[in-house]
Image (cartoon, grey):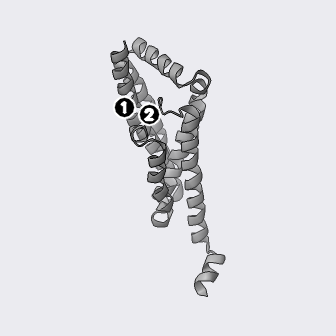
Amino acid sequence: MELARELIVMDPWNRFTAGLIAAMAFARGMDFLSTWIVTPRLALEANPLMRRLRWGRMALVNVPLLALPLFHHGLSITLVVTSLLVAGTNLSGGALARGMGERRQLESQLAALRRIGLPGALMMNSAGSLVVCLGGAFMVALVPVAESPPWWAALGVVLFGVAEFVHLNVAIVRLHRVGRRVG
């Protein structure tokens, strides 16, 4: 009887956890949806894990993440922020890919990479990622209480910058290799 009452009338901590689970489901769903909108065949996907696992297996890998709020609220907040930033970047940067199609967008990226060169492309992406990390680090420093929800959210911005650095630099190198084989 007590368990049933607890499930019906959740205390604020449980409501917060439930809200985090919902936010996690929404954020991860938006990451998937935005990726599908931009690159349904994953030809333009920067995340090597997603490219390797493809849609179904990657979805299965993400299902256990929905339980993360049951174990750690802070990491959940970080992942929600990071996932939403990834989804937003996918959607805003994906208009050309959606309009051109994956193949033409890939050809356009190859042409741009040939013009700027591998070192130039890596340097530009690395600098951009560093600026994002610095913005997140600045937010982390502004939060008066370490490991509070806003601190973890700011850490999500830092993690987004790190993910951009890793995934996009790997994608740039992969694209360079493709260009050498094609060109």
* Residue positioned 50% across, 46% down in the render: 82
Q: Nearer the viewer, residue 47 or 182?
A: 182
Count residues near mark 1 (Cα–Cα under 10 Å), then give few for <14, some for 14-19, many for 20+.
some
Residue sitting farthest toward the right = 9
Check disc 1 and give the amino acid type: Val
Q: Earlier in the sequence, mark 2 or mark 1?
A: 2
Residue 19 horizontal side relative to residue 65, left or right: right
Name the mark on residue 170.
1
Name the mark on residue 46.
2
Residue 168 horizontal side relative to residue 89, left or right: left
Identify the image quadrant of residue 163: top left
Q: Is residue 147 above or below residue 160?
A: below
* Residue positioned 59% across, 23% down in the render: 96
Q: Nearer the viewer, residue 72 or 107?
A: 107
Residue 14 horizontal side relative to residue 138, left or right: right
Q: Quadrant of the N terminus?
A: bottom right
Report x, y in % for residue 157.
Answer: 49, 44
Count residues near mark 2 (Cα–Cα under 10 Å), then give few for <14, some for 14-19, many for 20+.
many
Q: Is residue 167 visible?
A: yes
Residue sitting farthest toward the bottom = 1
Q: Are marks 2 and 1 in contact (CB under 8 Å)?
A: yes
Q: Is residue 66 above or below residue 92?
A: below
Report x, y in % for residue 57.
Answer: 44, 48
Report x, y in % for residue 81.
Answer: 53, 48
Q: Nearer the viewer, residue 105 or 157?
A: 105
Q: CA distance from mark 2 to mark 1?
A: 7 Å
* Residue positioned 44% across, 36% down in the render: 164
Check disc 2 and give the amino acid type: Ala
